[in-house]
Amino acid sequence: MTGSYIEEIISFLFMAFALGMDAFSVSLGLGMQKLRLKRIALVGLAIGIFHIMMPFIGIILGKFISGAIGNFAVLAGGVLLLGIGIQMIINAFIHDSKQMLDPKGFGLLAIAFTVSLDSFSVGLGLGMYGAKTAIVIITFGVISMLLTWIGLLLGRKVHGFLGIYSEILGGSILCGFGLNLLIG
């Protein structure tokens, strides 16, 4: 393995961690509902699958767009990552008291879709950049699933004080990668 290949994998791991922080935050709240372990496994699996599907669709579209617009694609990907990071940080400070969806049936699909929307946008940016699809989607799916399980299990023990800080951390990481694409 070359040095740049390892650096790329490490970058994807950090991005996956940043994107998974949204699922982690939501999972902390869901975990306070004292879900059974079977439900926890299913929620994590659903969120992991959505974190595979959404960036895959984004990467495919991003590669198509990249072919159409050429060198502008890297710049657009950087702006997109930076924008998503800023949005995550801002959303961390917006407290709305909406009721948590029940993680069953449609509620589970809605939760999984919602927390994976940002991975679609990141996938779009990575597709424009020309990232390796299989590595990205597997990394995003596995990390988000693990963070979801950790969040659900911690939520059973802890009362949500980590939520805002995890979203700020995730947004900061995405901003850093966006700036790296724009400047570096």
Image (cartoon, rainbow, N blue to C red):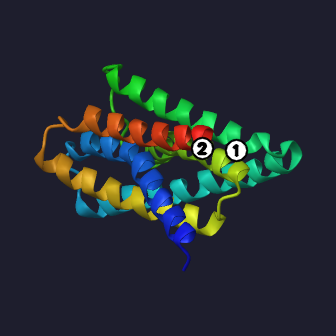
Q: Quadrant of the C terminus?
A: top right
> Is residue 104 in view?
no
> Is residue 119 in view?
yes
User: In the depicted view, which residue is nearer to us: 43 or 61?
Assistant: 61
- Give the residue drawn at x 38%, y 46%: 23
Query: Residue 172: x and y, percent?
Result: 40, 37
Callout 1: few (<14), some (14-19), or many (20+) C-alpha neighbours within 10 Å? many
**Left/right of residue 117 with respect to residue 157 in the rendered view:** right
Query: Residue 13: x and y, percent?
Result: 44, 60
- Give the residue drawn at x 19%, y 37%: 160
Residue that protrudes farthest toward the left in the picture: 157
User: In the depicted view, which residue is nearer to us: 62 or 106?
Assistant: 62
CB of mark 2 within 8 Å of CB of mark 1? yes
Residue 21, quarter of picture: top left
Query: Residue 114: x and y, percent?
Result: 50, 39
Decide which of tag 2 and tag 1 comes sooner along the chain: 1
Q: Which residue is mark 2?
A: 181
- Give the residue drawn at x 30%, y 20%: 97
Q: Is residue 94 above or below residue 119?
A: above
Real-space CA distance between mark 2 and mark 1, rounded to the nearest whole angstrom: 7 Å
Q: Is residue 171 above or below residue 57?
A: above
- Give the residue drawn at x 41%, y 23%: 90
Q: Which residue is mark 1?
A: 74
Residue 52, quarter of picture: bottom right
Residue type at mark 1: give it. Answer: Val
Q: Quadrant of the N terminus?
A: bottom right
Query: Residue 159: x and y, percent?
Result: 14, 38
User: In the depicted view, which residue is nearer to us: 101 or 61?
Assistant: 61
Residue type at mark 2: give it. Answer: Leu
